[in-house]
Image (cartoon, grey):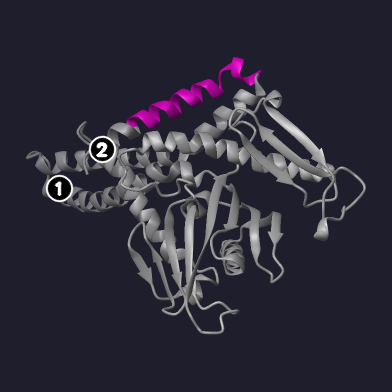
């Protein structure tokens, strides 16, 4: 824990502070004031760095104080009373330095994640028929309760239900402080092992669902050329295929460069369906490009937590054993009942710590 050039974290933080200073200069530049979009983008980028830079400056101040105290202690011309005071200050500053280093480390490696306060979650039933759809519903309920526990805002954007109350697919928006830093680890394949309600022989069945968590970008985070998006309008259908209304309210958006499509027919209003479809499309496109960046940046990491890869099995929920196992970090907890009620804190805390250590290894 030193500040010499051999410490990769300190080198990175010097770069971050320099970037912060440059952004500060740009923000007070008269030319910037004439470009509202640029001003907002610069302010947002500086905001992401603010907490980390503040901690780093506190840390540097503590290091300077330690050097001053050590200088006094080593000076033979200084009286013993002053040396005793310097020793007290040295002990205090050394403890402060250690604490600040850990806080600074957390802030640096997780700052970008903590700055994302809006996500789109998609939960889809996988193999297992009706039981998989019921499990998808269970996951939805779990995440809603977790969001409520964190006082986040949840919005149901779209869903497709089966006859027994399960979800073939459900899309929700979650907004609140640090939602990505918490929910970003949930992307991937979730597997359930339990006796279905329809199972008369009492046999344990295995079913699956997939979860995708995507940061919801702001206008300044991503630009989508309107000419790149095709819009298809049709009449929304209800149960049995009958028309919900006489208007063409169902919307399908297709982003030609990536091939990403979004269909929305939940609302009777074409305007509302279009707005929801655009929200989801923007998030999917943003995630498409961000996942490529993460893959390049994290190519040396052993696992990609929050990579958005639906095919990777990340967690098993075993009801007979009341067990939840997260396969990425080999963590098993025997409190499935509480977890399904939204108590995900222990799992997420362990995932964040593992993720942090891997990021530090790749500095």
Q: CA distance from mark 2 to mark 1?
A: 17 Å
Asked whether residue 283 is drawn in magenta, I would say no
Q: Is residue 31 magenta?
A: yes
* Residue 148 visible in the shown view: no
Q: Earlier in the sequence, mark 2 or mark 1?
A: 2
Q: Residue at 56% x, 84% y: name it.
A: 200
Whether 269 is drawn above or below 199: the answer is above
* Residue interval drawn in magenta: 14-34
Residue at 77% of width from left, 36% of height from top? 232
Closest to the observer: 35 or 303? 303
Residue picked out by circle 1: 83
Q: Quadrant of the C terminus?
A: top left
Between residues 219 and 20, which one lies in front from this camera angle? 219
Residue 93 pos. (x, y %): 26, 49
Q: Which of these two is toward me, 176 or 236?
A: 236
Reading the image, the residue beneath label 2 is: 64
Eye-nearest disc, 2 or 1: 2
């Amino acid at each position: 824990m030193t500040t010499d050039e051999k410490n990769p974290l300190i080198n990175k933080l010097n770069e971050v502070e320099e970037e912060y200073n440059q952004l500060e200069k740009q923000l007070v530049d008269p030319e910037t004031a004439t470009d509202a979009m640029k001003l907002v983008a610069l302010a947002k980028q500086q905001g992401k760095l603010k907490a980390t830079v503040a901690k780093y400056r506190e840390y540097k101040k503590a290091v300077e104080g330690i050097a001053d105290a050590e200088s006094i202690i080593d000076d033979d011309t200084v009286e013993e009373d002053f040396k005793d005071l310097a020793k007290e200050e040295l002990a205090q500053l050394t403890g402060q330095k250690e604490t600040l280093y850990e806080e600074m480390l957390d802030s640096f490696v997780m700052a970008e994640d903590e700055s994302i306060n809006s996500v789109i979650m998609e939960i889809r039933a996988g193999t297992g028929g009706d039981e998989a759809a019921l499990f998808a519903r269970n996951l939805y309920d779990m995440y809603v309760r977790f969001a409520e526990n964190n006082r986040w805002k949840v919005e149901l954007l779209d869903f497709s239900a089966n006859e027994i109350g399960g979800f073939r697919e459900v899309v929700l928006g979650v907004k609140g402080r640090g939602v990505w830093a918490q929910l970003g680890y949930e992307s991937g394949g979730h597997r359930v092992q339990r006796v279905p309600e329809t199972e008369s022989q009492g046999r344990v069945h295995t079913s699956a669902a997939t979860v995708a968590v995507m940061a919801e970008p702001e206008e300044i985070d991503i630009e989508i050329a309107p000419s790149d998006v095709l819009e298809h309008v049709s009449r929304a259908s209800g149960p049995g295929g009958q028309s919900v209304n006489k208007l063409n309210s169902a919307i399908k958006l297709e982003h030609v460069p990536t091939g990403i499509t979004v269909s929305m027919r939940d609302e009777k209003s074409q305007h509302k369906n279009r707005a929801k479809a655009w929200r989801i499309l923007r998030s999917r496109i943003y995630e498409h490009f961000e996942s490529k960046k993460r893959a390049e940046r994290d190519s040396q990491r052993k696992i990609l937590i929050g990579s958005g890869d639906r095919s990777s099995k990340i967690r098993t929920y075993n009801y007979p054993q009341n067990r939840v196992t997260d396969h990425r970090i080999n963590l098993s907890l025997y409190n499935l009942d509480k977890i399904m009620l939204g108590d995900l804190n222990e799992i997420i805390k362990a995932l964040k710590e593992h993720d942090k250590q891997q990021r530090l290894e790749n500095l």
